[in-house]
Image (cartoon, rainbow, N blue to C red):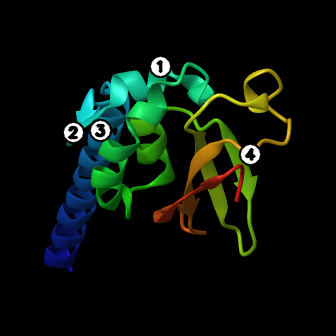
Amino acid sequence: MKNEQVIANRAHRYLFFSLFIIHYSLFIQSCSAPPDRLGSLDLVKWREDRGGCRGVRASLVEDFKTIRQELKGKSANEAGMILGRPDSEQLADRNQKYYIYFLENGPHCQDPKAKTGSRSVALRISAIGLVTEITFQRGRP
């Protein structure tokens, strides 16, 4: 009986220690600064051009296309940290959503809710919070 208690205590300590390490590593990761580059994409320029209103994102489209496969499988939080807050979010069926980043100036620059035909890129986020698809289109998907 005493050996079983010792084993149970060790298991509880190991579990507590493991959970502490996981929690601490997530805390440290969430406090880290977002990267400045991903492949050839200058993320600082990307994040500074909210809504693509200054025209900088339009010049970064080819660089974005080269790294879009690296974004697939990332969590919505990671994608938001890397690319910055999305310009628009859209709910889809089955608890999915889209993060939309505009690539050029348009009516959305004056009124974020305005209908726009400006070029954009949409990241589809699955129900479990992972980026599953990245598409280019005009306006919102």
Give how far apart the Cα atoms at labels 3 and 2 are.
31 Å
Q: If you read the primary sequence from the N terminus, does the residue marked by circle 3 or circle 4 appear first?
A: 3
Determine which residue is flagged by label 3: 24
Q: Looking at the image, do the residues carrying marks 4 and 2 touch, with CB atoms under 8 Å apart?
A: no
Which label sits in the foreground, 3 or 4?
4
Which dot marks residue 48? 1
Q: Amino acid at mark 1?
A: Glu
Which label sits in the foreground, 3 or 2?
2
Q: Looking at the image, do the residues carrying marks 3 and 2 touch, with CB atoms under 8 Å apart?
A: no
Determine which residue is flagged by label 4: 117
Residue 98, how many percent across, how many down?
Answer: 64, 56
Which dot marks residue 40? 2
Give how far apart the Cα atoms at labels 2 and 1 are.
17 Å
Q: Amino acid at mark 4?
A: Gly
- The residue sitting at 66% across, 66% down in the picture is 96
State the image quarter where residue 92 is shown: bottom right
Give how far apart the Cα atoms at labels 3 and 1 are.
30 Å
- The residue sitting at 49% across, 40% down in the picture is 80
* Residue 43 left/right relative to 5: right
State the image quarter where residue 1 is shown: bottom left
Residue 57, how many percent across, how many down?
Answer: 46, 32
Q: Residues within 10 Å of mark 1 (few under 14, many from 20)?
A: some
- The residue sitting at 22% across, 66% down in the picture is 11
Badge count: 4
- The residue sitting at 26% across, 41% down in the picture is 25
At mark 2, the secondary structure is loop
Give how far apart the Cα atoms at labels 3 and 4 are.
44 Å
Quadrant including the C terminus: bottom right
